[in-house]
Image (spheres, grey):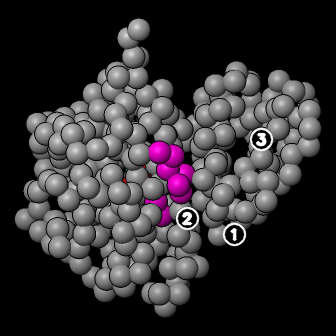
Amino acid sequence: MKNIYSNILSFNKKTLKKTVKSLKLQNVASLPTETVYGLAANAYSLIAIKKIYKLKKRPKKNPLIIHYYDINDIKKDVIINNYFLKLYKKFCPGPITFILKKNKKTKIRSLATANLNTVAIRFPKHRVIRSVLGSINFPLAMPSANISSSLSPVSAFDVFEEFKKKVNIIIDGGRSKIGVESTVIDLVRKPKILRPGIISSKEIKKYLKVNISKGSTKVRSPGMLKKHYSPGIPVIIGKKPSNNKHAYIFIGKKSKNQNNYFSLSQKADLKEAAANLYKIMRKIKNRGFKKIFVAKIPNSGPGVAINDRLKRASR
Ligand code: TXA
Ligand code: MG
């Protein structure tokens, strides 16, 4: 029988070589990271970047995050500052993205940064993406590997569900441990969180010793404007469903015979809850539920990221 998942590859020397070759030929590949799976392409190649936007059906005004192996690779692309150095030392490689000023000499294609004079950079931690980044001499533009505005993928099968065979290489690196996208922090001006993630503003504040502003993200993060992270069915926050055709997402212990109830974390751990969020929303959608109701989630630590994604999904 033909293997319908033939583009999902396990990770080894041979598939690393195949991936590197494909990226050098300006193609896209889906690679695992610790946050979510990404759709990777050479950030210095216009052909490659165009493929990302086309596959994702992504609006051109929404810039991409550029991924690097380590700090030695970024100098020709961005202007480094002290805030960045402090956070880099503490959190990288890891689930945090920095907005920095673009270096005028950069080879990053301006389509990848939506013509802005800033660049979003990240140093992912997952061993697969690090092996790939360590084997090439260009950075990778890499948005989450989902069709624009839908749920981000946290496994190779999730990516397959989004793109089927339109992506030739999907490397299976297991379930993404963090499960929500990186924290995005603007360091060009006064540090400001543009997208909350598992690294909280409280934690960042400890190291920068400045107040981190929140406020509106409208001006500074163009991609955060619209409906996002949507399972494709209505999401209603703060209410319980009145019948079992509708799913209910909550935190804590589940009792028997509640087949439409989905706990993000039975032991009420917010980090675990964040890691399960997209997985569970995708499961609910695939089981054919018509609506998702969600309990109120505490708005602290990882709860801030969970509430941010739920709020956008509910629009
Ligand atoms: O965890 C992650 O960050 C994942 C994995 C694959 O690395 N990537 C990811 O990329 O979430 P994406 O494209 O789905 O989200 C990128 C976000 C968008 O909200 C975009 O608007 C913002 O980063 N962004 C990118 N460049 C920016 C810039 N120069 N200024 C402000 N926001 C920017
Ligand atoms: Mg995304």
Quarter holding the N terminus? top left
For the residue carrying disc 3, how many other residues have a C-alpha within 10 Å: few (<14), some (14-19), or many (20+)?
many
Type of the residue with mark 1: Ser
For marks 3 and 2 on the same chain, the one whose residue lies earlier in the sequence: 2
Q: Residue furthest top?
A: 1
Q: Which residue is mark 1?
A: 300
Could you tell whether 106 is left or right of 57 in the image? Answer: left
Q: Disc 3 designates what residue?
A: 262
Instruction: Give, as a single range, the part of the protein colored magenta.
Output: 174-183
**Taking 313 as reference, is 106 left or right?**
left
Q: Is residue 229 above or below residue 307?
A: above
Q: Are marks 1 and 2 in contact (CB under 8 Å)?
A: no
Type of amino acid under label 3:
Phe
Query: Measured from the top left, where is residue 122 in percent x and y?
Result: 33, 63
Residue at the location (53% across, 55% down)?
177
User: As shown in the figure, which amino acid type bears the numbered disc 2?
Assistant: Ile
Q: Position of residue 98 (x, y in %)?
A: 36, 68
Q: Out of 206 and 214, give the one closest to the viewer.
A: 206
Quadrant of res 138: bottom left
Query: What is the spatial separation of the Cα atoms under label 3 and label 1, in whole angstroms?
Result: 21 Å
Q: Is residue 98 above or below residue 222?
A: below
Residue at 35%, 77% in the rendered image: 88
